[in-house]
Image (cartoon, rainbow, N blue to C red):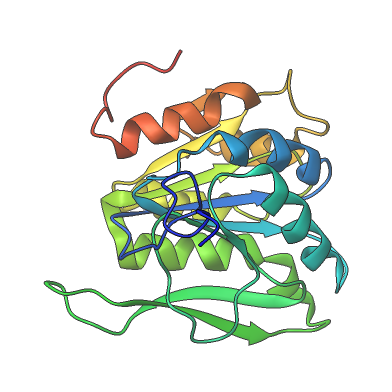
Amino acid sequence: MDGSEGSPTLKQVTHTPEWVVVFGTNTGGPQALAQVLPQFPIDFPGAIIVLQKMRPGFTRVLVDHLQQLCRLPVVEPTDGQALLASRIVIAPAKTKLTIANLGSISVPEYSIILEDIDEQYEPMRNRVDAAMTSAAQIFGPTAIGVLLTGVGNDGLEGMRAIHGAGGITIAQDQATSVVHSLPASAIDAGVVQEILPLWSIADRITAIAGGKRDAVAA
């Protein structure tokens, strides 16, 4: 035995998430994600879902790149795959990703639902909204929505849904964004609770999931 199996430093087996974090981003997103996602600890008690606008095939490249940087496993999911804690899920291009609870309130069993939307205009324009709204419906106060650098307003209604469900909404600040119109759309609508520089977002989410929801962000 070479000692690699069972090592506590390796990316570990995951379990049912207590939290779900949905990131929405486009322009400047790969660079931002490469800074934020590696900061999450290996025992993070939530599932992380990423909606990054990319051409087909490029999300696989993003997964491979992030896998080299992150302590958590990074996957491009298939339809019906279990949603697990301590794992980062990168939604495939041209798909609508939502969450379903196939278990019960007392014994949840979360699943990833993928719908091929190809070039359908409205679903393509609202992929972040769909994922965040689903997270709000399933997780309620333990849903966290995050908008990073980008253009447009996809995610505005999703952030509104999470905010309304008692969850947490976070937007990247203008100073650290390549383009700020994506987070700014939700900020201007009054559905963002915290505006943070890129470097502090992962630490803040980790603190919230660790029971420090009311702590002031650094």
Question: What percent of the width, then of the height, locates residue 86?
Answer: 43, 54
Q: Residue at x 69, y 33 (%)?
A: 35
Q: Is residue 41 visible?
A: yes
Q: Is residue 214 above or below residue 185?
A: above
Among the 4 quarters of the image, the one containing residue 212 = top left
Q: Residue at x 43, y 35 (%)?
A: 205
Question: What percent of the width, then of the height, locates residue 61?
Answer: 83, 61
Q: How many marks?
A: 0
Task: Name the foreground residue: 153 vs 109.
Answer: 109
Q: Residue at x 55, y 22 (%)?
A: 200
Outermost residue toward the top in this view: 218
Q: Residue at x 42, y 57 (%)?
A: 6
Question: What percent of the width, then of the height, locates residue 97?
Answer: 57, 74
Task: Name the foreground residue: 99 vs 187.
Answer: 99
Among the 4 quarters of the image, the one containing residue 71 = top right
Q: Is residue 173 above or below residue 190?
A: above
Specify whether 132 is left or right of 185.
left
